[in-house]
């Protein structure tokens, strides 16, 4: 008899919530959960009804990292790391805003999954650790790329090499947490944040997210070219005239992301040539 699903999925008002559901292991991620995350993130990225995504953990913890309870697998590490790589890239490149709702521990791969989200909302009792060095391992799930960009090289080395545990306030001071909210208010706070993101223009939000993600590794010239391409895509949607109209009419805009370039009728050259013949 199979147990409960390791990943819970729920949809409400354009927001998809993925909840890691192994509370007996503080939501440590095993092979089944990695595969479930890969499938769920791919699905969310291809579903245009999903306008924002929340990643959470069940049972008072966010995620205690990869589940090492069973010891080292006899599968070659390269194969296992492919799944982690897929999950990390899918999360980072989702064309919708993402929120990590963190309560309790966020450790190792679990913390780096949270950092891969666009926003991290934590409670005062949340704790964080890049625990890898304590397990004779190196950073994964994008930690080696994310940490230096978020906190600078020296602090990244401190977190990675010493594998210290820090609290939510220190994490916020280091720009690793966006907001710290009381445990009794975090659900409402995240719901409101997600609703605000859902109300945004989806194409513009996707373009802004991609520009910022890519900009850290671009020259100014490359960034400006990317901005020009993104702006052209925005002006091809119905959201730009809707934004202007809403401003003029002093009302809230309603964004859909709908393509609004007029269709050009297909030329009738073939028919005309046939008639001339």
Image (spheres, rainbow, N blue to C red):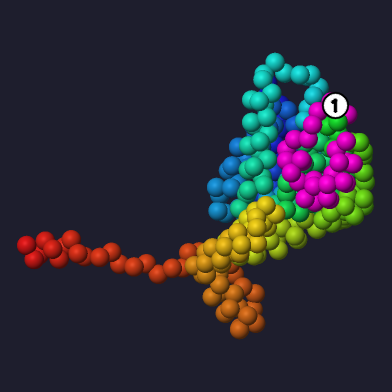
Query: Quick check: can you spot residue 198?
Result: no
Residue 180 in view (yes/no): yes
Q: Nearer the viewer, residue 90 or 44?
A: 90
Residue nearest the viewer, comparing 110 with 53: 110
Q: Position of residue 29 (x, y in %)?
A: 75, 31
- Disc 1 is placed on an element classified as helix
Residue 241, compared with residue 77, is above or below; it is below
Q: Quadrant of the C terminus?
A: bottom left
Report x, y in % for residue 110.
78, 38
Q: Residue at x 59, y 47 (%)?
A: 45
Q: Is residue 152 within the magenta segment?
A: yes
Left or right, 45 with respect to 65, comes to left
* Farthest left residue in view: 277
Percent of width and height locating residue 41: 63, 42
Q: Residue 163 location in percent, x, y?
A: 89, 36
> At 83% across and 47% down in the image, what residue appears?
153
> What span is colored magenta in the figure?
134-161
Q: Which residue is mark 1?
A: 135
Q: Nearer the viewer, residue 174 or 18?
A: 174
Q: Residues within 10 Å of mark 1 (few under 14, many from 20)?
A: few
- Residue at the spot 81% in from the left edge and 22% down from the top edge: 69
The quarter of the picture where the N terminus appears is top right
Which quadrant of the figure has residue 181? bottom right
In this view, the residue in front, 128 or 43, is 128
In the rendered structure, the answer to whether residue 185 lies left or right of residue 222 reads right
Q: Main secondary structure of the magenta part?
A: helix
Residue at the (65%, 62%) spot, across then down: 220
Whether the magenta-drawn stretch holds residue 154 is answered as: yes
């Amino acid at each position: 008899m199979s147990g409960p699903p390791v990943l819970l999925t729920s949809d409400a008002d354009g927001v998809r919530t993925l909840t890691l559901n192994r509370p007996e292991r503080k939501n440590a991620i095993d092979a089944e959960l990695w595969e479930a995350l890969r499938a769920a993130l791919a699905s969310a990225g291809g579903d245009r009804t999903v306008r924002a995504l929340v990643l959470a953990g069940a049972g008072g913890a966010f995620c205690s990292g990869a589940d090492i309870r069973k010891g080292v697998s006899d599968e070659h590490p390269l194969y296992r790391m492919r799944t982690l790589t897929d999950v990390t890239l899918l999360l980072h490149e989702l064309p919708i805003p993402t929120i990590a709702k963190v309560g309790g521990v966020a450790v190792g791969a679990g913390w780096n999954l949270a950092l891969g989200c666009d926003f991290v909302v934590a409670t005062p009792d949340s704790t964080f650790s890049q625990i890898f060095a304590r397990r004779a391992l190196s950073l994964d799930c994008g930690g080696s790329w994310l940490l230096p960009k978020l906190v600078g090289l020296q602090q990244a080395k401190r977190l990675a090499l010493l594998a210290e545990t820090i609290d939510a306030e220190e994490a916020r001071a280091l720009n690793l947490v966006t907001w710290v909210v009381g445990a009794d208010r975090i659900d409402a706070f995240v719901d409101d944040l997600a609703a605000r993101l859902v109300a945004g223009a989806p194409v513009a939000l996707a373009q802004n997210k991609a520009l910022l993600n890519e900009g850290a590794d671009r020259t100014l010239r490359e960034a400006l070219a990317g901005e020009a391409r993104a702006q052209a895509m925005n002006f091809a949607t119905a959201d730009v005239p809707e934004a202007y109209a809403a401003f003029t009419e002093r009302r809230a805009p309603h964004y859909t992301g709908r393509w609004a370039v007029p269709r050009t009728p297909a030329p009738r050259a073939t028919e005309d040539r046939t008639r001339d013949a």
